[in-house]
Image: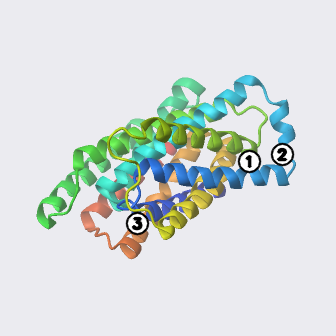
Amino acid sequence: MGAAAALVSSALWAFTSVLLASQSGRLRPLMMSAIRSLTASLMLIGLLIATDGLVQLKEMTFVTGVSMMGSGIIGQAVGDTLYINALGYLGVSRTFPITNSAYPFITFVLAVLLLGESVTWTLPIGGALIVAGITWIVLEQRRAAAEAELHVELVRGVIFAVAAAAAWATATIWLRGQQGDLDALGAASLRIPAASAAVWATIAMTRGRGEQPLRTVTRRGIAVVSAAGVLGTGLGSILFIYAVGEIGAAKTAFLTTSAPVFALPMGVILLSEKINARTLLGTAVTIAGIWLVLL
């Protein structure tokens, strides 16, 4: 069940990424994070109350509570905002392979060092394939941008994508190590609202300092981002936390790398993004490396 939860969470995140990318020219990344984290928070709190889950919050330790909120801020508030920035620079078809290759590799390394998870002989081979796949995808992006005159800022996009992966990895390890007796809904009900509060506080502190976080706001845009919040940030987080508790941080991170399989065709169909054989081959090499690391 843990593996299935991770795969469904991955598919939801892929669809969410396409929704967010469709609004990248209308809402700024910080505001998109704020809207979707708020809608997800309302959903999670409502579910917690409806299922009498408030009792477990009263019984948790102080360290567990602080850790869940901290991991939420790092993962959702920081990591997701960095990821949305990357989407605007690189698009779904290339941001996903980069983040979903770097994230599980970083998570695995941290899980070994900090949580004592085992190391297999396939780790260096798989790691080399992951690096090769990421490099292939990035170089292909450079070539495609030069030939098709695409609006791509490669360096910034890659920096944002890798930084997002590092933030997610840190949050996952923190979640795994300090969840305590909280179930998936209880943990999510602390993580997401804390992230939402951090994002809204950042918006409040930066108001009036240069450009506003909003671009062209429409009801449709807000509705799309809100749907991304409910599906990806809300439901996806519950499934992800459940998977981490059932099968561990590293294995969950690896399974969520199936997201590019969902995201690439979604980007082509819904956003008219272009992919070619080189991009697909780079993704295949990366995924092969991840599965070798998982063995």
Which tag is nearer the camera, tag 1 or tag 3? 3
N-terminal label among 2 and 3: 3
The image shows residue 127 at horizontal and vertical percentages of: 38, 40
Residue 30's disc number: none
Residue 185's disc number: 1
Question: Looking at the image, which residue is at 58% across and 43% down?
Answer: 196
- Can residue 100 be seen by looking at this rendering? no
Q: Amino acid at mark 3?
A: Ser
Other residues around mark 2 within 10 Å, as few (<14) / some (14–19) / many (≥20): some
Q: Amino acid at mark 1?
A: Leu
Q: Amino acid at mark 2?
A: Gly
- Element class at badge 1: helix
Q: Quadrant of residue 265?
A: bottom left
The image shows residue 94 at horizontal and vertical percentages of: 33, 57
- The residue to which callout 2 is attached is 53
N-terminal label among 1 and 3: 3
Other residues around mark 1 within 10 Å, as few (<14) / some (14–19) / many (≥20): many
The image shows residue 122 at horizontal and vertical percentages of: 44, 40
What is the spatial separation of the Cα atoms under label 2 and label 3, in whole angstroms? 35 Å
N-terminal label among 1 and 2: 2
What is the spatial separation of the Cα atoms under label 1 and label 2, in whole angstroms? 8 Å
- The residue to which callout 3 is attached is 22
46 vs 273, left or right, is: right
Other residues around mark 3 within 10 Å, as few (<14) / some (14–19) / many (≥20): many
- Element class at badge 2: loop
